[in-house]
Amino acid sequence: MSELTSLKIRFSEMGDRLAAPVITRLMAAALDSPELLSLAAGFTDTTTLPGGLVGEVVGKLVGRPGPPEYLQYGTNQGRPLLRNLLVRRLSEQDRQEEGVYQSNQLFIANGSQQALSLATQVLCDPGDIVLVERPTYFVYLDVLRGLGVEARCLPWDKDHRLDGEALEDYLERMERAGELERVKAVYLQAYYANPTARSLEPREKAGLAEALLAKGLRIPVIEDAAYRELHFENPPAASSVLAMPEFADFPCLYLGTLTKPFATGLKVGFGYCSHQGWLDRILFLKGQQDFGTSNFCQAILEEVLAGGQYDSYLPELRRHYHSKMQVLDQALREEGLSELGWEWEVPEGGLYLWLQGPQGFNTRIDSAFCHQCLMNGVLYVPGDLCFGNEVENRYVRLSFGVLSGNDLREAGRRFVETVRQLTPA
Ligand SMILES: Cc1ncc(COP(=O)(O)O)c(C=O)c1O
């Protein structure tokens, strides 16, 4: 045993690049101390997951005459009926006529995370660059790091909007530095993003398309819409990049998921790709990895989408997350976080509050603040993890997904108490 432990395996370059994501340290801390209240995990609320509904659907599947085809392997691209249903849903959301979006352009994945990862792997080599928002989804930053790819944040203005004018200069500078060749893709979250819960306005996306085209950069665009269905009141008005004329000349990949709005544990997501060559390669790689997402999980989702239960379940779920967001937001306000110089926007969807601490406040995982939060029994995601470059240290992501009621209020109270302790008088 000890001989084996000391044996040095020669890993691939990628294997060597991999490191335990910081977030797993936070998760481990939460598991080690059950009294900790976690505002860190981006999980859904286990108490509202549709157990009864899934039980009924499974009963229905099992009761069907004929062999249980759903227990057989499925196809690499995914169940045809499910793909049709998702294409119809996406067409409605984007207000596109039937037939504009085609189900053969859509593939089912093991969560949208798999689709994102596959799509990036087939595009990027070590040393390449992917343009991302500022801040962005930290798990994607880990994916890029693992591939040896550099994440570069797009320029944002003081209102945290994509800065169209600065973008031209930014690309100009990259051109002068001979870096444009290395830019392989741009990654966006247009709906209630993780971590900011902000949505991109169509003019921001259009400005980006214009600036990229002006530099001849017709690069793949990945639009991750993981939270699009999790709006609180009104559905988002903006259509996806797939339907925007400004992106007609770009290869676009739209990522959606059925995990957050329905059942995270079924782990079914999808990608819609407007470029055949890119899609083919994604599917070749998926074929090597798993040659198809769980057919059984797909069959369950197919049933709930076709039978309308998915749509009847969503409004309640939206109300639930809306009210949880209000509980956390109110707890932070009542405890006096704003008076301590912290700012945040009230989101209209998603699972997160994105807080900006005062200038100079340090929220990193190795900071006194993070340490004190652990001592006081509350966990958060340090915002610095969400920056590709030019990292900022005064932000925090809080999730209201998991906790509810008194626990959520108490977590908010502990958070503000810790801020108070660490704020100079
Ligand atoms: C922005 C974003 N994209 C993608 C995912 C992956 O979700 P899933 O693989 O469950 O579809 C997540 C999960 O937290 C996310 O926050």
Image (tube, rainbow, N blue to C red):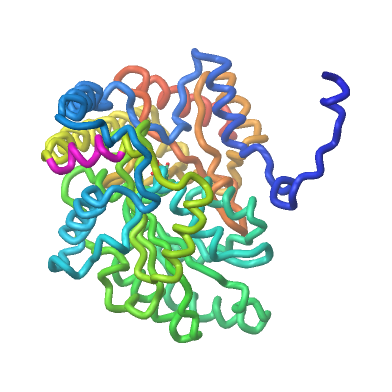
Residue at 28% across / 48% down in the picture? 79
Q: How many marks?
A: 0
Residue 23 shown left or right of residue 46 in the figure: right
> As rendered, which of 180 and 327 lies closer to the eye?
180
Q: Position of residue 354 (x, y in %)?
A: 42, 44
Residue 355 seen by the camera: yes
Dominant SS of magenta comes to: helix
- Quadrant for the N terminus in the image: top right
**Which quadrant of the render holds ligand 1?**
top left
- Is 377 inside the magenta-drawn segment? no
Q: Position of residue 42 (x, y in %)?
A: 42, 36
Q: Which residues are magenta?
A: 298-306
> As rendered, which of 265 and 303 lies closer to the eye?
303
Residue at 50% across / 14% down in the picture? 34
The quadrant where residue 47 appears: top left
Q: Is residue 357 above or below residue 183?
A: above
Residue 73 shown left or right of residue 186 in the figure: left
- Is 303 inside the magenta-drawn segment? yes
The quadrant where residue 322 appears: top left
Q: Position of residue 106 (x, y in %)?
A: 32, 58
Q: Is residue 179 above or below residue 186?
A: below
Residue at 13% across / 68% down in the picture? 97
Q: Position of residue 96 (x, y in %)?
A: 16, 67
Residue 134 seen by the camera: no
> As rendered, which of 16 and 299 lies closer to the eye?
299
Q: Is residue 38 above or below residue 308?
A: above
